[in-house]
Image: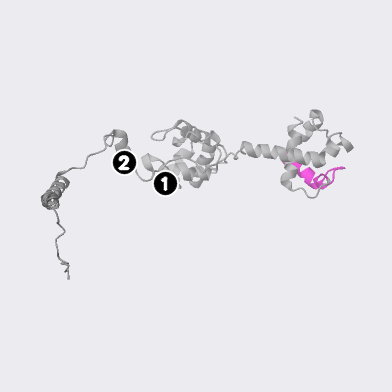
Amino acid sequence: MDTHDSHSSFIKTPQQLIVVVLLAFLVPIIGIILVVNLVLSRPTAEPNAMTPESVAARIQPVGRVEFGAGGGAAAGTRSGEEIVKAVCTACHQAGVANAPRLGDKAQWAPRLKQGLNALVASVVKGKGAMPPKAGDPSLTDEEIARAVVAMANEAGAKFKAPAAAKPAAQKQAAAADGKAVYDQTCVACHAQSVAGSPKLGDKAAWAPRIKTGMDSLVQSVLKGKGAMPPKGGNASFNEAQVRAAVEFMVSQSK
């Protein structure tokens, strides 16, 4: 019976023996070379990594503060309080560079004596450490006036701020609404001057009415006047719609 030696060598030929001997020498040597290269090697920098632009990009702060009225509001429509909060507090809150602190009556007193126009002009042109328009060129003169009034009145002044202008889009919408109301109701009388109503476009007929002021005209329509019933006979109209219709007729009759 043949017997099988489970511990017999896998080397069967002289060629296999030569391969095993070579591997026994080469594998440790290759391992030593790799370890030495790993220890002695130094990391190489990207060729463009040290350019001024790359360095500036790496050291740029995570966040930054930008001064401006911002908020997405259209130029000319921002309130004084909004502008003070977004632009002016950066210096006037703590009195940076001798800026009068908000609410400090003693510091504001000599400035208030100059009057609103002089204060606004100093902001528009810039004064001392304050750049023109407080560093925000998007501000209109009216917005600057509103901001100055807000700060001055907090310090005891009683200036009156200019009213905020309506954005162009709002004006266009109001004009469209006014024409729609006119076409729906007012045209019945004002197109032909029925019952003595001023005809649309008749400057002579509208002139004395326009002199009474927009509020007076709106109130006469809301309450009714002469043969015209309240709200022109359409009780569903609100005051804004009535005003829009009056503004449209006036704009067409100047």
Q: Which mark is residue 137?
A: none
Residue 44 in sight here = yes
Tell me which segment is drawn in magenta. Answer: 214-232
Report the Cα–Cα distance between label 1 and label 2. Answer: 33 Å
Q: Which residue is rendered at x = 80% and y = 41% of the image?
A: 184
Q: Is residue 98 left or right of residue 193?
A: left
Q: Could you tell me if residue 152 is visible in this image?
A: no
Q: Amino acid at mark 1?
A: Gln
Instruction: Check disc 2 and report the residue beneath it.
Output: 58
Residue linked to disc 1: 93
Amino acid type, label 2: Arg
Mark closest to the chain's N terminus, 1 or 2: 2
Instruction: Give the mark toward the camera: 1 or 2.
Output: 2
* Image quadrant containing the C terminus: top right
Residue at 73% of width from left, 33% of height from top?
251
**Magenta stretch: helix, strand or loop mostly:** helix
Looking at the image, which residue is at 82% across and 44% down?
232
